[in-house]
Amino acid sequence: MVSLEYLLKFIDEDAPSGDVTSDAIIPEITCHAVIRAEQEGVAAGLEEAGTLFSHFGVEARPETRDGSTVKAGEVLLTLSGPAKKILLVERTALNIIGRMSGIATQTKAMADTVKAENPRCRVAGTRKTCPGLRALDKKAIVLGGGDPHRTCLSDGILIKDNHLALVSISEAIARARAASAYRKIEIETESAHDAVTAARAGADILLLDNMSPDSIRDTIGNLESVGLRDRVTIELSGGITAGTIRDYAQTGADLISLGALTHTVRNFSVTLEIRK
């Protein structure tokens, strides 16, 4: 759960000087309202929305839990309290639920596809999140059954192509190992030769980037032939979509990370209905 202060920044963005429309036309009355799903998917963001409503004196009762599968028409939250405050928080709450549920729903669909082909393989996110929303985006991935991956650059060592433009694979791994004995070392590779080189140099995780399924199978085969496959985790990334993820899951990889989970979000449709 993110902090209240974090969430209140969204209200400040949407109503820096209050809700001038509601303040002008709505008297000091209370009302009831519901937030309802308009499609089937995985609910997410209910905790955050409820926290915001509660802060403004609105009783928010969840009718389901974050991470649960919901149907179109199902009530997610029941609200009761000052009408002006419900209207103040409405759009921010719906935006949070819509984005997080969209990410969670897409993640679950991807994870289910992968598990059907390779039960050992996990789906993960990346750092391709919306600036300022990473905490919510990453939580939504977890609620959808995915792995959040690194939250930030401080979380783990991941040697990428632009690092390797400046230092060799073996030297990069040696320096990373010298800098920290307690962190796993992941390195991006784009060929079977580089993957074997990295594994021999002591990498823990090989990120096979922008490789076709056939190239990935060849790379894994090369690692097996030199006795290194079981010493490394194989992660796949780079342009993988819902249409191709099944083929990648069949390669025998351990992890598939997808920027599309958070950089191409299809908002989950939710609505708030007020009852006098």
Image (cartoon, rainbow, N blue to C red):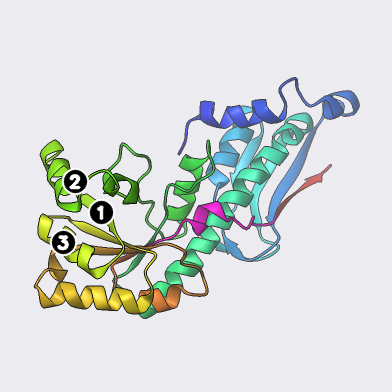
Q: Viewer-proximal residue, 94 or 134? A: 134
Q: Amino acid at mark 2?
A: Ala
Q: Amino acid at mark 1?
A: Ile
Which mark, by number, is residue 197?
A: 3
Counting from the top left corner in percent of width and height, residue 268 is at 64, 57
Answer whether residue 262 is magenta in the image: yes
- Residue at the limit of the structure toward the right, as seen here: 25
- Look at label 3 and name its amino acid: Thr
Q: Are marks 1 and 2 in contact (CB under 8 Å)?
A: yes
For the point 56% across and 32% down, the residue is 7
Kindly state the secondary structure of the residue where label 3 is placed. Answer: helix
Quarter occupied by residue 57: top right
Q: Secondary structure at mark 1?
A: strand
Residue at (73, 30) in percent of width and height:
85
Query: Gap in Å between the C-alphas at discs 1 and 2?
Result: 9 Å
Q: Nearer the viewer, mark 1 or mark 3?
A: 3
Task: Give the residue pinned by disc 1.
Answer: 187
Give the residue number, with chain letter if any, for mark 2.
172
Q: What segment carries the magenta color?
A: 256-269
Residue displayed at 52% across by 29% down: 6
Indicate which disc, 1 or 3, sits on the residue closer to the N terminus. Answer: 1
Residue at position x 25%, y 54% in the image: 187
In this image, 124 relative to 40: left or right?
left
Q: Quadrant of residue 229?
A: bottom left
Horizontal arrangement in the rendering, residue 200 relative to residue 85 (left or right): left
